[in-house]
């Protein structure tokens, strides 16, 4: 721990929209494949894979969006591949971390064809991340995500693209995702491919030393850690007064993850969207040798 009271944090962007790439000063810290696909494509992944299951009107809408690409799957893969290639080129050889889809089903409810995904009573703690990737119904969508990464890395030569895996609940799920990626031709370590874990759950922080045995690094999402550590629904305005990334319990979890990454000699990034409203957190991060934060 160092005394850095005079220092300031550096800020990197969470890439959610290709419009951000037009800004010459855009410094990308992390790409959200969830947000990018929603802003760029607007079609639910299940509707891309199983267009024939939609009613005639929506089938036509999907095909019109696909346009000259013909197949909706080709439209989906091609457009997102191009976006990742543009982002990777902007990094000029430095790593571009891409977080695979990990959002809950509610966030996809407004997308075209969302009726193909089952409604969940508690979507925030529902089928997300690795459990969703392993789900048979989702397998086609997962394969498309992998195809996007493979095209960007292999066909376009953007080998600086690295993966970040969201919502890894258990150590066994860590092994599962590494196997699932390998089945799709994305073998950790092959051609320099690095795979990181998104630390969103208290379990990820508490057992970070063990999770890091499966991954090349860790990305700590302080907001998500806070949501699960304090049991908050971030979309419920009535509970907004309780959201506090500077809470002692949250900082304890972050510290555990930081320490485990340092002990393992593996890179650690920090994400929080409320950093500008949290001066105490800014100071705390600097005191714990974190000088860069990813935010929107």
Image (tube, rainbow, N blue to C red):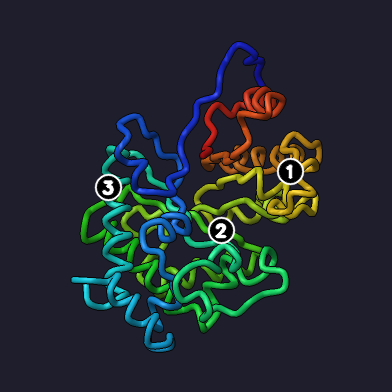
Q: Nearer the viewer, residue 26 or 248?
A: 26
N-term mark: 3 or 2 = 3
Q: Is residue 283 visible?
A: yes
Relative image position of residue 164 (x, y in whole percent):
49, 54
N-term mark: 3 or 1 = 3
Name the residue tied to disc 2: 166
Q: Secondary structure at mark 1?
A: helix
Relative image position of residue 278 (x, y in whole percent):
68, 29
Q: Secondary structure at mark 3?
A: helix
195 versus 185 height, above or below? above
Quarter holding the N terminus? top right
Q: Is residue 201 left or right of residue 269?
A: right
Q: Is residue 90 left or right of residue 227?
A: left
Q: Nearer the viewer, residue 57 or 234?
A: 57
Relative image position of residue 81 (x, y in whole percent):
29, 59
Residue at coordinates 65% horizontally, 55% vertically from top-left? Answer: 210
Mark nearer the viewer, 3 or 2:
3
Residue 27 figure quarter:
top left
Residue at coordinates 56% horizontally, 73% vertically from top-left? Answer: 132
- Which label was assigned to residue 86? 3
Mark nearer the viewer, 3 or 1:
3
Name the residue tied to disc 1: 253
Q: Nearer the viewer, residue 216 or 41?
A: 41
Of all residues, the one furthest to the top in this rendering is 6
Whole-number angstrom distance, CA of label 3 to CA of label 2: 23 Å
């Amino acid at each position: 721990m160092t005394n850095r009271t005079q220092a300031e944090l550096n800020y990197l962007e969470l890439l959610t929209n290709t419009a951000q790439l037009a800004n010459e000063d855009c410094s990308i810290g992390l790409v959200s494949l969830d947000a990018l696909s929603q802003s760029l494509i607007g079609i639910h992944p299940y509707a891309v894979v199983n267009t024939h299951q939609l009613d005639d009107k929506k089938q036509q809408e999907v095909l019109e969006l696909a346009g000259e690409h013909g197949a909706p799957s080709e439209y989906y893969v091609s457009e997102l591949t191009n976006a990742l290639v543009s982002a990777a080129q902007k990094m000029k050889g430095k790593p571009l971390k891409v977080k695979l889809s990990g959002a809950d089903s509610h966030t996809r409810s407004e997308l075209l064809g969302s009726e193909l995904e089952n409604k969940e009573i508690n979507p925030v703690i529902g089928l997300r991340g690795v459990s969703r990737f392993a789900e048979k119904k989702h397998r086609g969508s997962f394969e498309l995500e992998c195809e996007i990464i493979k095209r960007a890395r292999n066909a376009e030569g953007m080998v600086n693209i690295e993966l970040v895996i969201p919502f890894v609940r258990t150590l066994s799920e860590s092994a599962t995702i590494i196997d699932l990626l390998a089945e799709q031709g994305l073998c950790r370590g092959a051609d320099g491919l690095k795979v990181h874990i998104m630390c969103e759950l208290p379990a990820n922080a508490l057992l970070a030393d063990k999770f890091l045995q499966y991954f090349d690094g860790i990305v700590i999402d302080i907001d998500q850690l806070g949501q699960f550590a304090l049991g908050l629904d971030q979309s419920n305005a009535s509970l907004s007064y309780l959201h506090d990334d500077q809470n002692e319990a949250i900082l304890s979890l972050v510290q555990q993850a930081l320490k485990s990454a340092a002990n393992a000699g593996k890179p650690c990034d920090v994400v929080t969207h409320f950093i500008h409203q949290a001066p105490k957190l800014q100071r705390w991060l600097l005191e714990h040798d974190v000088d860069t934060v990813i935010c929107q």
